[in-house]
């Protein structure tokens, strides 16, 4: 049953990642690779398409991130349960997803999880983004600042997005980093599975 679930979760993540990349491609074509979008100079239909593509690409990226972490957690849970048994697994089934990966890997193999490899960093970043999304907060918006034209309005927009995602540091860049992290972490499930099979 666990195999079907974590495999299914990864399948859902991959479907939404594909939809995300399709929306991103259309969004980049519309915006000349994410150049400043001036709402006031565009036709109504162009603005509607812009906001629809933005909403769709964000929706699919969020779903992909959440389901990727669910697939990884399901995989490590099955791994720990299979090799350690229910009692020992339940004793170690504590802490964050990253803690579980590191601890269960050590308990089963007797070796430390390779934290110096890119897989660890990708897992860590992906889980951090998922946690930020899951624990997002409401904020108060200044509509006049958002309706402005130019770099300052764009900066304010990304600051608001990242505040809603709970990011208190480096607010301007977190949203862009979420896309980068998703792109670099999209294969963590299959890479972790390969590592666990050794």
Image (spheres, helix red, strand yellow):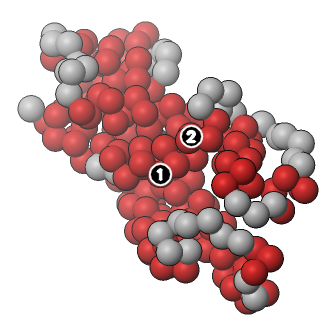
In the picture, measured across the screen, residue 184 lies left or right of residue 90, that is left
Name of the residue lying farthest toward the left: 198
Which quadrant would residue 166 be assigned to in this image? top right
Q: Where is residue 75 shown, x and y percent of the image?
A: 34, 38
| Residue at image point 72% right, 51% down | 152
> Does the residue at mark 2 contact the one at mark 1 (Cβ under 8 Å)?
no
Report helix, strand or loop for mark 2: helix
Which quadrant would residue 30 be assigned to in this image? bottom right
Q: Where is residue 130 shown, x and y percent of the image?
A: 54, 39
Residue indicated by mark 2: 174
The tally of labels here is 2
Question: In this view of the protein, which residue sits in the foreground, 3 or 152?
Answer: 152
| Residue at image point 45% right, 26% down | 97
| Residue at image point 42% right, 48% down | 180
Q: Which quadrant does the C terminus fall into?
A: top left
Q: Where is residue 98 shown, x and y percent of the image?
A: 40, 23
Is residue 37 depicted above or below 189 in this figure? below
In the picture, measured across the screen, residue 66 lies left or right of residue 81, that is right
Q: Where is residue 89 shown, x and y percent of the image?
A: 37, 18
Question: In this view of the protein, which residue sits in the foreground, 153 or 30?
Answer: 153
Which quadrant would residue 59 be assigned to in this image? bottom right
Report helix, strand or loop for mark 1: helix
Can residue 138 be seen in the rendering of this structure? yes
Residue indicated by mark 1: 179
Q: Is the residue marked by circle 1 packed among few (<14), some (14-19), or many (20+) residues within 10 Å?
A: some
Is residue 173 depicted above or below 16 in this figure? above
Is residue 179 depicted above or below 72 in this figure? below
Measure the alpha-carbon separation of dots 2 and 1. 9 Å
Question: In this view of the protein, which residue sits in the foreground, 13 or 88?
Answer: 13
Query: Does label 2 or label 1 sit earlier along the sequence?
Result: 2
| Residue at image point 33% right, 14% down | 103
């Amino acid at each position: 049953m666990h195999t079907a679930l974590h495999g299914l979760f990864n399948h859902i993540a991959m479907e939404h990642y594909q939809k995300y990349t399709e929306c991103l491609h259309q969004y980049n074509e519309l915006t000349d690779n994410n150049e400043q979008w001036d709402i006031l100079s565009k036709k109504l239909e162009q603005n509607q398409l812009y906001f629809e593509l933005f909403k769709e690409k964000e929706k699919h990226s969020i779903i992909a991130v959440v389901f990727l972490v669910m697939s990884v957690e399901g995989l490590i849970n099955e791994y720990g349960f299979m090799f350690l048994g229910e009692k020992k697994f339940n004793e170690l089934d504590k802490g964050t997803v990253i803690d579980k990966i590191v601890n269960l890997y050590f308990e089963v193999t007797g070796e430390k999880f390779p934290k110096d490899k890119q897989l660890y960093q990708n897992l860590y970043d992906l889980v951090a983004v998922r946690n930020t999304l899951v624990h997002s907060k409401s904020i108060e918006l200044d509509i006049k600042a958002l309706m402005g034209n130019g770099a300052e309005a764009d900066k304010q927009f990304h600051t608001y997005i990242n505040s809603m995602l709970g990011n208190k540091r480096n607010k301007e860049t977190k949203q862009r980093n979420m896309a980068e992290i998703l792109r670099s972490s999209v294969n963590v499930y299959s890479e972790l599975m390969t590592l666990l099979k050794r």
